[in-house]
Amino acid sequence: MASCAVRPPDPLPVGPGGAEALANPFAPATMQIHPLTRVERDEQGKLWIICHVEFKDAWGDTSKSIGQLEVQLYRPGAGPLVSDETQETRWPIDLSDLKNNAALYDSPTRTYRLPLKDPPPWVEGEEGKERPRVRLRAVLNTKGPAGERRLLQDDYIINE
């Protein structure tokens, strides 16, 4: 009896040499700043942005990644458009350093937990006022399955 399940086509057609011909068949195909991302204060009252980044491979499964990651913070402008925003600061994160990579990976959430130090005070907002719109952009410079250069990016609004 035939099954009713429809299997999607292979996302990485493999030519001669099979999967071994690929440098990394499980390289990330997508990146998302995860909704666990938030602004918080630690026990000493220091302000942090805790940014969670998730990578998925060509099959949509969570994966780890290597490469140069940069998280950028944008300050809202006077108008409602993204083009009115200005990049306020950035945090470079070296995921090519395997010790650093392993230390930042949070197994329970399957994300990289990135504590972003010293964000500007405006990200927390003022008491009694609406919290400001805080936009983060993550940009990863990495390699794809065949070893080709790949640039992944995602934007996320914290207070929306």
Image: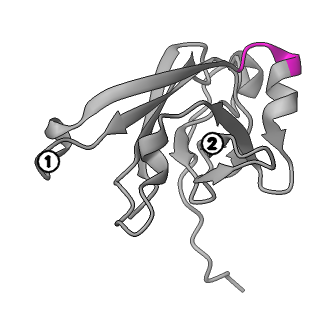
Task: Give the vertical position of 115 relative to 6 (above or below).
Answer: above
Residue 75 or 10: which is nearer the viewer? 75
For the view shown, which residue lies furthest in the front direction?
127
Q: Secondary structure at mark 1?
A: loop
Residue 146: image location, x then y, percent? 60, 18
Q: Give the number of the mark in front: 2 or 1.
A: 2
Tag 1 or tag 2, which sits nearer the N-term?
Answer: 2
- Our reading of the magenta stretch's main secondary structure is loop
The residue shown at (60%, 13%) is: 147
Q: Which residues are magenta?
A: 95-99
Asked whether residue 96 is drawn in magenta, I would say: yes
Question: Which residue is the site of mark 2?
Answer: 47
Residue 99: image location, x then y, percent? 89, 19
Which amino acid, by three-letter code, is at mark 2?
Leu
Q: Secondary structure at mark 2?
A: strand
The residue shown at (62%, 24%) is: 145
Task: Give the vertical position of 68 relative to 116 (above or below).
Answer: above
Which amino acid, by three-letter code, is at mark 1?
Leu
Estimate the spatial distance between the alpha carbons at disc 2 and disc 1, rounded to whole Å: 27 Å
Of the 4 image quadrants, the one containing the C terminus is bottom left
Asked whether residue 114 is drawn in magenta, I would say: no
Residue 73: image location, x then y, percent? 42, 34
Question: Which residue is the site of mark 1?
Answer: 81
